[in-house]
Amino acid sequence: MTRALTFAASAIALAFAAPAAAQSVAITNATVATGDGSDPIEGATVVVQGGKVVAAGTGVAVPAGVPVLDGSGTWVTPGLFATMTSLGLWDVGAVSESNDTRASDSPFSAALDVAPAINPASQHIAIHRAAGITRAASTVLPTGEIFGGQGAIIDLGADGDAVVEARAFQTVAMGEYGARISGGSRAAMYTALRNALFEARAYANGTWDGADAMLPRADAEALGAVLSGRQPLMIAVERASDIRTVLGLKREFPRLDLVLVGASEGWLVANEIAAAGVPVIADGLDDLPQGFDELGSTQSNVGRMVKAGVRVAINASAMENPRNLNQYAGNLVALTRIPGADGLSWGQAFAAISSVPAAISGMDGKAGVLAPGAMGDLVVWDGDPLEVSSAPIRVYIDGVEQPLDNHQSRLKERYRDLDESDLPKAYDW
């Protein structure tokens, strides 16, 4: 604790001197996890210059002129990458005026674009930044139609420019929910999906007939990026038989860049998923089914898919707060100690919340990893980040140190020493 406090004091001093632009900084003598699936390295150094990672590991020489922080007693990792979130799209869930996560009354579905709706000032962004999440995939939820629209990759920096990549992926709901909103049957759901892809192909080929089409022109145009493979198609699907059907889509549409989301029964068809080379964004610890398409749910789902060779990221949308990503990853490590269960090694678990989701989102080698040339997204923790008692003490995005205060932290300080004779204090915006 003493060493951590010493580091924190140095950090504060540096923060006062730091400009808003990308900083150059070297953190030495820390336990460093690079996010590539390997084990943490003790007594290591991380160097960031010009907003990029220059080096990470042992035996790293610090360039002349780069400020050095002693990280003794701390851990340094890449920023966490949260997948399939609604960060930046809502403030109060029950207040529709502040909630842009659904568009059930819109005449459009696949054409919806969340990028203009992202609010960088959302407190959810500030709260999750303080939890070590530096980048996320944000999207609306499918409601009236099976397609949810085009999600964006955002960073959680304290500035007004959150969108890193607009229209980065398309979402579609399959399984029980997809069947319900597309006519009440999986037969209707798959017909709707195939028809949409055929109409998009016709639009791309210049043979689309608007008078005869079921899709609005904007939706047919938007799905062109999916058909060509320029835009990953994130498919929410749980049941093993549905997963097989989804994998079979590539026979008709070979350029689809498929990503499975959910996949509670993925372990039952893990070898087929691995052979198809399709990555999965899976719920971390579903041990009980929430529907008939999840009857095969098991906490060993992620571990068994990884063992079969599937690239798996932990699904942030499956938890109430994506800031719990590291807790779920830690639980998967603990699962390895239960006889008969399959979990993940420490390195695999951390990669499932850093480099793997970044790679699935098109940022392979750029985010979620401490490697030369990667974005300067760093988190300094006061202990093992997969332990629930650990917390970030510094966060950098693109080499810029970020504030960690937010409404929750300010409320904590405001009422920490409340005199019970006081009237309730006004909310401090």
Image (tube, rainbow, N blue to C red):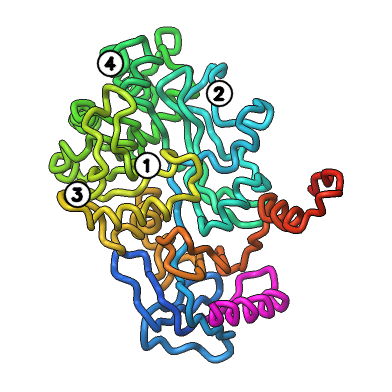
Question: Which element type, helix, strand or loop, lies under badge 3?
Answer: loop
Disc marking residue 103 = 2
Does residue 104 show up magenta in the picture? Answer: no
Residue 11: say if magenta: yes
Which numbered circle lies on residue 373? none
Q: Nearer the viewer, residue 414 or 423?
A: 423
Which mark is nearer the camera, 1 or 4? 4
Mark 3 vs mark 1, CA separation in Å: 38 Å
Q: Are marks 3 and 1 in contact (CB under 8 Å)?
A: no
Which numbered disc covers residue 186?
4
Q: CA distance from mark 3 to mark 2?
A: 40 Å
Q: Position of residue 295 (x, y in %)?
A: 23, 28
Residue matched to label 1: 230
The residue under label 3 is 341
Q: Amino acid at mark 4?
A: Arg
Name the front one of labels 3 and 2: 3
- The amino acid sitting under disc 3 is Ala
Are the residues flagged by discs 1 and 4 in contact, CB closer than 8 Å?
no
Name which of mark 1 and mark 2 comes first in the sequence.
2
- Of the image marks 3 and 1, the number of the one nearer the N terminus: 1
User: Does 116 sit left or right of 194 as displayed?
Assistant: right
Residue 33, can we see it? yes
